Amino acid sequence: MGERLQRFQARYEPVFIRILLLVIFVTQVVAQFVAPLGDFLQDQAFLGGALLSLVGYVLYDSVKDLAGSLRLPTRSQVRSQELGTFVGEAFRARTVEIRFLGYTGETLYHELYRLLEGLRDDPGPTRHVSVRVLIPDFGRPMTVPSRVGPDGTPQDDPDTRRRLEAQCQMYDERLSAIAERLTTVGRVTAECEYRLYPGIPRDKICIFNRELVLHGLYDVVARTVPRSSEPEYYDPKGYHTDLNVWSREGDDDARAVVATWNKHLDDLWSLSAAPSWRPDHPA
């Protein structure tokens, strides 16, 4: 029901606004030539208002698109610590669409939790939020994360994988619960979902509203600093990852990169499985 309402609004609201602007324009022009109507409107200055209405009609699409656009970064590379700024900018749009592929998505989770909670009291322009998070399948043996064995060889550690899986499950369940509450209230429809991809956490990819892409590579050989009696682990530090930035507002090469990453994450999502904790997990 929430998705149908959002699609209905997206389809018919612009039509309604255009019709309203045209009605105002026609009424104000006719008032200049029909005395009773002009007297009723009381002021010959309505011609200026009519012209403004016509300009608003012509520029409506451009203004609407501009208002929903992300502010573009001034640099071609940013730090992962700055991710929250981009999430906040994405939430300025009417339809918010965030796609993530990475390790656990911890940094993204904290920003999403804060902003989704804020929509309950002040949704601003946002009417629909869609979040998709792709994380490694921690149910499978992995070389990263893993324990550092003799001569640096990676040794799979089921306990570490279970701990990380439980962490991601908590993120997923909390974000999904907020999304359900928002949709129930009805001012904003929202959906948040996690899926699993096979392999190690190598790439960190964030896509905001299909127009801005951040991509970086984890340091896959980064190690934890153990206490005296604990072993070392290979544990990528996503918080320190540098991210390259591409925007659809850039040149032809940048637009091609954005289109490629959008398609890649869409395709990967379609092939990925729901985690075991979700109700839509295949039996």
Image (tube, rainbow, N blue to C red):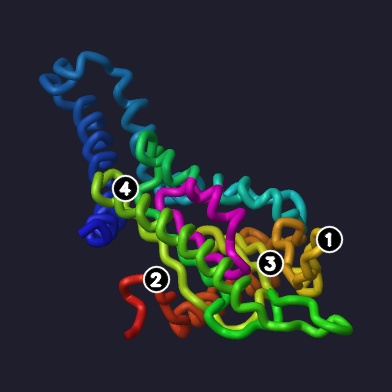
Magenta-drawn segment: 89-113
Which residue of the protein is positioned furthest toward the left in this rendering?
A: 36
Residue 35 at what x, y percent from top left?
14, 20
Amino acid under disc 4: Leu
Query: Does residue 14 appear in the picture of this structure?
Result: no
The residue wearing badge 3 is 215
Q: Identify the amino acid type marked 2.
A: Trp
User: What residue do we see at 40% from left, 38% from top?
Assistant: 124
Say which mark, if any, is on residue 182. 4
Q: Earlier in the sequence, mark 1 or mark 4?
A: 4
**Tag 1, which secondary structure?**
loop
Above or below residue 117? Residue 251 is below
Give the mark nearer the N terminus: 2 vs 4.
4
Q: Is residue 61 left or right of residue 283?
A: right
Question: SS of the residue at dot 2?
Answer: loop
Q: Choose mark 3 or mark 4, whichever is in front.
A: 4
Label located before the other in sequence (2 or 1): 1
Q: Residue at x 75, y 54 (%)?
A: 79
In the picture of the structure, the residue carrying the numbered disc 2 is 277
Residue 228's disc is 1
The residue lying at 60 percent from left, 63 percent from top is 206
Name the kind of residue labelled 3 in the image.
His
- The 10 Å Cα crowd at callout 3, few under 14, some 14 to 19, many 20 or more, is many
